[in-house]
Image (cartoon, helix red, strand yellow):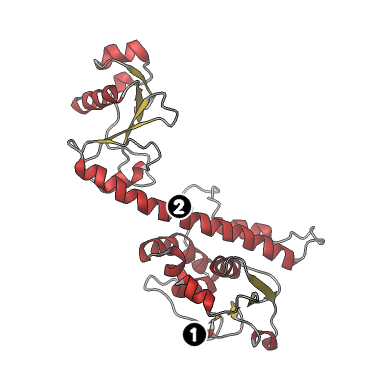
């Protein structure tokens, strides 16, 4: 689909993208970043509020008071807005662009939806004035990726830096960030297919074995049975036996190793666990190590019995 899109425009010229001049926000920055991804960087960015300039543009984004995806006009500042999602988050310019091009850029609907939920809707909410974050500890805040865009805006002391220069710097960051997140999610989807097959073919689904140390273990959380994951260290020095978290982004695990094993190493751990060729058990009981795959399996089996 992206190849077809590119063919609609002359390959002998750069695609002209117009955004508003003056201060900038994450939505117009990410919009230009997305168009740069689509056209392999072959775009000319013009920052203007002159309606005459819009007429000569291939894309007009976040300015112009017009939303018409067929004409590549993607503004949301008109009185009637440009629509909102069922969850109440209104569309900003990046959300409108993503609605049209997200699936093509990501290659499938699943990845496009993940990126929309994790990134695009966050930018839309920020631009449309909808608060998403909740302060759990007074005075302590996470640093959202959108703050990186605001941090590029010159401070009151940086008179030598123009807003146009800062805007391009912000676009470079947003483009790299967006491309990386798409890559991560697409690779994760490929990994999910492999992990699903491993899970399905496992004799004891409480103990899952990855021969490839790079496969992500979080995919196993969606299944109820897995308790321990076994996989070799990347350098081949030992086999790691790790616990499975109860939920994504949670530190609570389904089963710790027995407390009597915590902090024990080598022969001492072997004597307590009854398993030979073990290396260590971390304090806290969330992972342990064994010299061989067989020893790792036996260590996990022993832990399950206690």
Where's residue 298, x and y in %? 24, 23
Image height of 285 relative to 94, above or below: above
The number of callouts visible is 2
The residue that appears at 48% across and 81% down in the rendered structure is 82
The crowd level at tag 1 (other Cα within 10 Å; few <14, some 14-19, many 20+) is few
User: Could you tell me which quadrant the N terminus lies in?
Assistant: bottom left
| Image position of 14 (left or right of 228) | right
The residue that appears at 55% across and 52% down in the rendered structure is 143
Where's residue 174, x and y in %? 58, 60
User: Could you tell me which quadrant the C terminus lies in?
Assistant: top left
| Image position of 134 (left or right of 258) | right
| Image position of 15 (left or right of 284) | right
The crowd level at tag 2 (other Cα within 10 Å; few <14, some 14-19, many 20+) is few
Q: Quadrant of residue 53?
A: bottom right
Name the residue nearer the viewer: 251 or 20. Answer: 20
Task: Report the disc number at residue 27.
Answer: none
Q: Secondary structure at mark 2?
A: helix
The answer to whether residue 255 shows anywhere in this view is yes
Image height of 285 relative to 127, above or below: above
Where's residue 159, x and y in %? 81, 62
Where's residue 12, x and y in %? 64, 76
The residue that appears at 44% across and 71% down in the rendered structure is 89
Identify the residue under disc 1.
Answer: 70
- Circle nearer the N terminus (1, 2): 1
CA gap between label 1 and label 2 equals: 30 Å
Q: Quadrant of residue 87?
A: bottom left
Identify the residue under disc 2.
Answer: 184
| Image position of 26 (left or right of 276) | right
Name the residue nearer the viewer: 112 or 263. Answer: 112
The answer to whether residue 134 shows anywhere in this view is no
């Amino acid at each position: 689909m992206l190849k077809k899109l590119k063919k609609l425009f002359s390959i002998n010229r750069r695609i002209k993208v117009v955004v508003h001049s003056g201060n900038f926000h994450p939505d117009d920055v990410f919009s230009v970043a997305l168009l740069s991804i689509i056209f392999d960087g072959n775009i000319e960015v013009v920052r203007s509020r002159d309606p005459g300039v819009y007429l000569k543009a291939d894309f007009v984004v976040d300015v112009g008071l017009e939303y018409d995806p067929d004409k590549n006009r993607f503004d949301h500042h008109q009185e009637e807005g440009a629509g909102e999602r069922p969850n109440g988050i209104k569309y900003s310019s990046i959300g409108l662009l993503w609605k049209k091009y997200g699936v093509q850029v990501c290659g499938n609907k699943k990845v496009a939806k993940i990126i929309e939920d994790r990134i695009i809707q966050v930018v839309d909410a920020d631009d449309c004035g909808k608060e998403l974050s909740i302060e759990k500890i007074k005075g302590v805040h996470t640093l959202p990726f959108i703050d990186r865009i605001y941090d590029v805006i010159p401070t009151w002391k940086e008179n030598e830096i123009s807003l146009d220069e800062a805007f391009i710097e912000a676009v470079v960051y947003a483009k790299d960030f967006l491309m990386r997140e798409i890559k991560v999610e697409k690779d994760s989807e490929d990994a999910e297919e492999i992990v699903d097959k491993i899970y399905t073919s496992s004799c004891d689904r409480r103990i899952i074995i990855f021969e490839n140390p790079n496969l992500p273990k979080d995919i196993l959380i969606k299944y109820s049975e897995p308790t321990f994951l076994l996989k070799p260290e990347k350098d081949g020095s030992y086999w790691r036996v790790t616990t499975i978290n109860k939920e994504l982004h949670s530190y609570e695990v389904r089963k710790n190793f027995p407390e009597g094993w915590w902090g024990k190493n080598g022969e001492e751990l072997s004597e307590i666990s009854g398993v030979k060729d073990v290396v260590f058990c971390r304090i806290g009981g969330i992972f342990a190590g064994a010299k061989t795959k067989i020893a790792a399996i036996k260590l996990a089996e022993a832990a399950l019995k206690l």
